[in-house]
Image: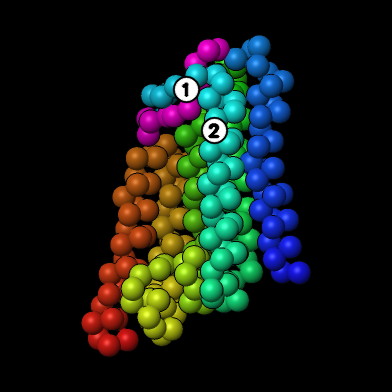
Amino acid sequence: MEMNKDIRRIVLSTLICLLPIIYGLIVWNDLPELVPTHWGADGQIDGYSPKALAVFGLPVFLAFINIIVNVAIMADPKKVNHSDKMKAIATWFVAVLSLIIVPICLMAAQGILINVPLIISLIVGVVLLIVGNYLPKCKRNYTIGIKLPWTLDSDENWNRTHRLAGYVWTVGSILCILAALFGQMMLMLPIVILMTVIPCVYSFILYRKGI
């Protein structure tokens, strides 16, 4: 029964990833041959893709990533330890991302004025904020959380690391959102790096202390 539920979730989330193709077909004749698919930190377009690749290739790529993520979650030997909220985020994140990212790329190609870097930055900040809130509730497993040799080897190391990470990610995500709102998207990368490095270093220190 659980296997059937997992398979249905994979199929549904994958179909959602592919939904933007419908919008692409509807506006196909309004799209230029090259569609903007990448923006720099300054908000300027610095990458284009052929129309067919943007309409079909991007959703298919995201669908493929979605399948990999969901299969990894389903195959985790410790999946009973997954937090329901964290599992839901990991399960549906790529599908929701496809529903947002692909259409706004196509809208930008149509000449609709959209601040794509701001939208993407805010999405990243909000997701990190939500994840940070639930990290401390995440029990030791192989697919969701801060998976290091030391955290995977010790429940105490895992729990302490994720409690700290919850605070660090919450503060860091709020800083990311503020950076996006004030047009300082270039600050987000160093913030995210610190959000990643601080819990990892703390986990290693615990390991060296025998925890």
Q: Is residue 98 above or below residue 40?
A: below
Tell me the amino acid under the disc marked 2.
Leu
Left or right? Give the position of 54 relative to 28: left
Residue in the foreground of this view, choosing between 91 and 202: 91
Q: What residue is drawn where x is 37% and y is 53%? A: 192
Whichever of callouts 2 and 1 sits on the residue coming sooner in the sequence is 1
Report how far apart the C-alphas of labels 2 and 1 lie in the structure: 10 Å
- Percent coordinates x, y for residue 169 in the rendering: 44, 62
Q: Residue placed at 38% from the left, 24% from the top?
A: 46
Q: Secondary structure at mark 2?
A: helix
- Which residue is located at x 72 percent, y 20 percent? 26
Q: Residue furthest bottom?
A: 210
- Label 2 sits on residue: 58
Residue 30: within the magenta? Answer: no
Q: Are marks 2 and 1 in contact (CB under 8 Å)?
A: yes
When asked about the image quadrant of residue 162, the answer is bottom left
SS under mark 1: strand
Extreme residue in the right direction: 1
Q: Which residues are magenta?
A: 32-42
Q: How many marks?
A: 2
**Residue picked out by circle 1:** 49
